[in-house]
Image (spheres, rainbow, N blue to C red):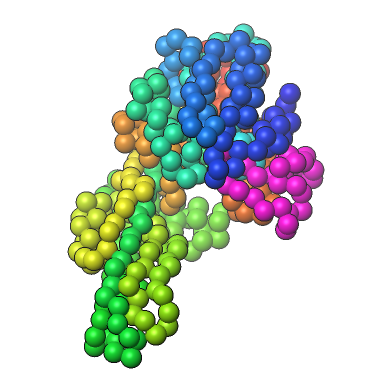
Amino acid sequence: MDVARLTSSLVRIKSENPPGSTADVVAFIGEYLDSLGVKNRIISHPGGRDNLITTEPDPRLLLCGHVDVVPAIPDDWTHDPYGGEIAGGYVWGRGTTDMKGGCAALLIACCDLIESGVTPNVQFAFVCDEETGGPYGIRSLLAQDLLLPRECLIAEPTPAMSPAVGQKGLYRIDLSFRGRPVHSSLYPLVGKSAVMAAFDLIGYLRKVHAHPFPVSEDLQPLVMQSARIFRDIFGIEGGDEILTRVMFNPGRIEGGEKANIVAEQCRMELDIRVPWGCSLDDLRKSIAEHAPDAVIRETNVAAPSLTHPDARVVRTVSREVERVYGTVAPFLQWAASDAKHLRDKGFDVAEYGPGDIPTLHAVDERVSIEQLEKAVDVYRGVIREYSGDPSPAGTR
């Protein structure tokens, strides 16, 4: 089975999150690894939230991917989002980019090496719950000390020539504001509006966003290189500001009872991305101070993280990307992934994987077959390095 067909097979196995069940796709991967003679174990959680790890002795590199995907509504798709169609040089469907294509490329790279007589000295982890930041995926495996190597490659989609070596912090919270209702004709002189309290916090966050945080001298070149990648590949201007400012989104607000009643309650879901140089603890305190009547529930929290460019896993992945593409430019992510949990536990992590990133989480998500095949080539070289095989990286 080639990498395009394996990607297609994975896409056809639904693993939407929510609801979050990965049991079927994990079972499929387990059977594939069994066929290669790779020992593996499935760790199950309620609702079919399954993870798979391999259990070969003394692995030197962790290869990781999540197999849950965001939901897809098929109405506007050119191809069935769960059909895994191969057409026009692409594999189409939900999860092709994020990130079943990357998972397939890891598995094919492993298969190629085994068939060539190399024993991959790696541990695989295919996990659930990444899309919702839930507790049953990578965090569960870390809590149980089931992930052995301290160096990790995650097959998250990245620009073809750009491994990701760091990501901004994340502070995701639910806030429940309480007001003091009176007749609307008396407000704002009398009463207290829960809705306005939410808007007041948004106003404060606008002020926080207005001021960039200084980055260290050694991080500055990565910030500027990342800004160029944002502009040239994603068409996003102001990448340096994205990476150095607090970014925030009140993704959902609901509250109030009627137009003629001052709102007694309001709930807001708030997503905040935290730059390097910004203290997460200080930000927490300032938000609590500017929302004194709100109950704050933290749902996903992680400090900004970075793997040093001189770390072995970054150097190895970068070398293989440069071999395949002729150039390499590591960058910093503005979004978050499971890398944040691994780095928090002391892992060196690089992220690199195939994908048509503008279609990630979007209608007509797809991945090019060429990029899948080149990812396999990169992964083969990385696995060879950690398996102590002296053969040329591009050979099979």
Magenta stretch prevailing secondary structure: loop
Q: Is residue 155 left or right of residue 311?
A: right
**In the rendered view, would you say 252 is above or below 127?**
below
Q: Is residue 287 left or right of residue 221?
A: left
Residue in view at x 75 percent, y 41 percent: 83
**In the rendered view, would you say 198 is above or below 80?**
below
**In the rendered view, would you say 31 is above or below 365?**
above
Which residues make up the magenta segment? 67-95
Q: Residue 196 occupies which quadrant of the picture? A: bottom left
Q: How many marks?
A: 0
Question: Given the current orientation, which residue lies at the most extreme right position?
Answer: 87
Query: Residue 94: x percent and y percent?
Result: 65, 45
Q: Residue 345 occupies which quadrant of the picture? A: top left
**Does residue 68 appear in this view?**
yes
**In the rendered view, would you say 23 is above or below 298?**
above
Query: Residue 45: x percent and y percent?
Result: 47, 29
Q: Residue 263 occupies which quadrant of the picture? A: bottom left
Residue 153: in magenta span: no
